[in-house]
Amino acid sequence: MKIQQDPSRGFRKIEKLPHGVHIGFIYENINDLLQAVSLFFKFGLERNEMCLWALHKGLTLSKAKAVLKKTIKDLDKKIDIGQIKFKNHKEWHVEGENFDVSMAIKNLNSEGVEAFHNGWNGLRVSGNPLEFNIHWDVLRKYEETATQTLHKHKIIALCAYPANQLSLNKMIEIVNSHPFTLTRKGSAWVIEENLTLNSIRTIKRDLKIKIKDLQKFKNLSINRELKMVELKQKIQNLKNKLKRYKNARENKN
């Protein structure tokens, strides 16, 4: 007798991740997208988080609700109390007729603040930036800025990209621009960490801390020279390490 795999198993790994996580998801078909978002929100609700879906182009509000109801039995109640919200994709990303990075980030910030003030433990967001005909450099800037914004609030974001709109190089770039990626392997969902990207961010964070420490020691008289030499050496070591990670990442691409 064949044992049926639990399709939600991979999503349980997200529950062990801290807020501020940015997940890239390249999906093959609409059913994969709908199941992924449903499970992503289901576990968020269980953690008493607020969930917001910037609806993909062509996906109606009634269709989105019908899909979520299959996984979230008390969906109507969650909507009534404001724990689940829906936005038109243009409301979320567009100013006039163009994709606007600053507007999208502003919306992300304001929703994160609202979730906090309303007593939720965090915010989950899902959307598809490729709904718009935007230059790839603009999209890259958006993803990088979004990753920084998520760390300021208790936000977990699932950015969904349709595979049929991406070249192989673009897929690789999406994976490289997200600290984590979600993929479907058979009936199972898998969360994988981008170790190189996360290592670079950790090094940058440590570097900033050491530079701040150096500024503090400049104002001290006791053992100042010795401390400054030690800190300068640590800063140089971190810079060298950061350079090696970046070179490794470029060679990988």
Image (cartoon, rainbow, N blue to C red):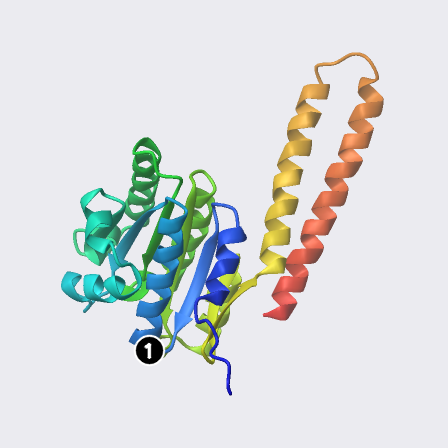
Residue lying at 33% horizontally and 78% vertically, measured from the top left: 29
Question: From this viewpoint, which residue is outermost toward the top?
Answer: 221
- The foreground one among 165 and 63 is 63
Residue lying at 37% horizontally and 44% vertically, measured from the top left: 48
Secondary structure category for the residue under label 1: loop
In the picture of the structure, the residue carrying the numbered disc 1 is 29
**Side of 127 where 172 appears, left or right:** right
Residue 67 drawn at (x, y percent): 24, 66
Residue 226 falls in image quadrant: top right
Residue 227 drawn at (x, y percent): 80, 24
Task: Work out whether 67 lies above or below 124.
Answer: below
Q: So how many labels did they put on this image?
A: 1
Question: From this viewpoint, which residue is outermost toward the bottom?
Answer: 1
**Side of 2 where 89 appears, left or right:** left
Name the residue type under label 1: Asn
Name the image quarter holding the C terminus.
bottom right
Q: Is residue 165 visible?
A: yes
Q: Is residue 87 visible?
A: no
- The foreground one among 3 and 59 is 3
Task: Work out whether 174 lies above or below 214.
Answer: below
Residue lying at 43% horizontally and 45% vertically, measured from the top left: 150
Residue lying at 45% horizontally and 38% vertically, measured from the top left: 152
Task: Work out whether 56 lies above or below 162.
Answer: above
Question: From this viewpoint, which residue is outermost toward the front?
Answer: 1
Residue 212 falls in image quadrant: top right
Residue 133 drawn at (x, y percent): 27, 66
Residue 143 falls in image quadrant: bottom left
